[in-house]
Amino acid sequence: MSISVANYKAFSWMSDPLASRPLRLDPDDSVRKEMAWSLSRGQLDIDRPIRFVAAMGGKPAPLLWSRLTPLVCVHQRVVDVLSQHSFKGWSVYPVEVYGRKGEPIPDYYGFAITGRGGEVDISRSQLVTKPAPTERGRPYQVYLGMYFHPEQWDGSDLFFVNGHRVVQERVVKAFKRAKISNVQFISLPDVELDAYLYRS
């Protein structure tokens, strides 16, 4: 399978918009980083719901992001959108979500992306120097554009490229039509990657 750089506009990075008003969660103490990654990739079967409690914010939203990357919970509305369109590359696991006053918030699931897109293909990206963010700061470098190796992609609608969630354009359109909030989509050619992380 071959994908031109222009065609990567049909893919978007799905990420946390870092909004302050929506509820942000913490999982219970039994969940460690390695376990979190396994859950987020659908690689772990659990025999009990994972408990999430309010950490910041306060307003429930269709997606509730966690302070423990990469965990995220989704409302039944999100599950319905993904199911109705028969999108491939995702699954859910049982969770219990509690609000700021300890009240249970129903109809949420842990969200996993099971599709695979292999590694970031940094050779297609452009190295760009950005101005210092503050007067006392320093200029810094990013790779503009996040690309993947097409032969490593399994064809799913939702998939991981390294640790990045990537979705096809039809997923973005379905979310927008359903007014699914508290999620950010950035076209892959517009994604900026910290150059420091990709230097050999």
Image (cartoon, rainbow, N blue to C red):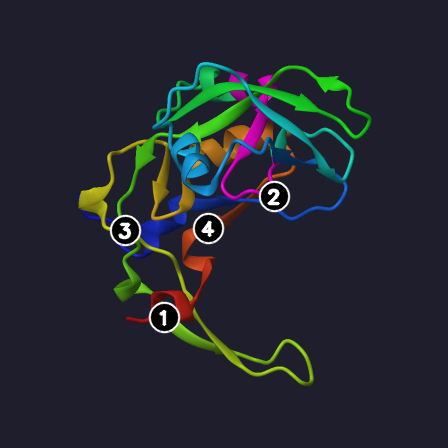
Residue 77 sits inside the magenta stretch:
yes
Please report whichever mark, 2 or 4, sits nearer to the chain's N-terminal start.
2
Q: What element does badge 1 sit on?
A: strand
- Depicted 123 relative to depicted 103: above or below: below
Marks 3/4 in contact by CB < 8 Å: the verdict is no
Query: Residue 35 or 151: which is nearer the viewer?
Result: 35
Mark toward the start of the polypeptide (2 vs 3): 2
Which of the two discs, 1 and 2, sits closer to the camera? 2
Q: Are marks 3 and 1 in contact (CB under 8 Å)?
A: no
For label 3, the SS is loop
Tag shown at residue 119:
3
50 or 75, which lies in front? 50
**Stretch in magenta:** 65-80
Q: Is residue 89 or residue 25 the one in the foreground?
A: 25
At a point 74% along the width and 46% down the height, the residue shown is: 20
The residue to which callout 2 is attached is: 67
